[in-house]
Image (spheres, rainbow, N blue to C red):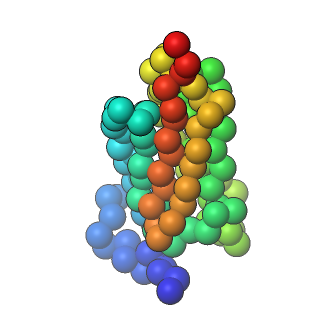
Amino acid sequence: MHCDYSQRSYLLPEGCKDLTDVIQPKTAVTEHGFIVTARLPGLQNQDIQITAIGRTLRIFVQRSGDPAPLGKTIEVPVPGDYALAKAEAMYLWGQLRIVVLKAAA
């Protein structure tokens, strides 16, 4: 099922065309690692690019076929004792989840 959130603009803050304009990632530290989650409804895997720059995860989102030239970039700082090189990401049912494991001691 594909959801067109642009038709629900009356629910969004002023100046936002869809939900990717108001992404609010959440972070948590667990025994398994540093976890970042973000609700990104209506996207496909190819609409999301994740890169690590220094100690920061950069999540770039742009809906496929969107005529707008710019997407949305979110930056999430990662604590120093986590191995960004071992990060794993999964996007399923509108939810992005990134797990960054603890660095080996």
- Residue 80 in the image: above or below residue 74: above
Q: Residue at x 59, y 38 (%)?
A: 87
Residue 12 coordinates in the image, percent (x, y): 33, 64
Q: Residue at x 62, y 55 (%)?
A: 48
Residue 44 shows in this picture: yes
- Residue 41 in the image: above or below residue 80: below
Total number of numbered labels?
Answer: 0
Q: Residue furthest top?
A: 105
Q: Residue at x 68, y 69 (%)?
A: 64
Give the left or right position of residue 18, taking residue 29 as reference: right
Residue 46 coordinates in the image, percent (x, y): 69, 62
Q: Residue at x 52, y 13 (%)?
A: 105
Give the left or right position of residue 105, taking residue 54 as reference: left
Q: Residue furthest front?
A: 105
Give the left or right position of residue 92, taking residue 11 as reference: right
In the image, 61 versus 21, the foreground residue is: 61
Residue 71 shows in this picture: no
Tell me the quarter of the picture where residue 68 sits: bottom right
Residue 76 coordinates in the image, percent (x, y): 48, 33
Tell me the quarter of the picture where residue 13 sits: bottom left
In the image, 97 versus 19, the foreground residue is: 97
Residue 35 coordinates in the image, percent (x, y): 42, 40
Tell me the quarter of the picture where residue 53 sits: top right
Q: Residue furthest left?
A: 11
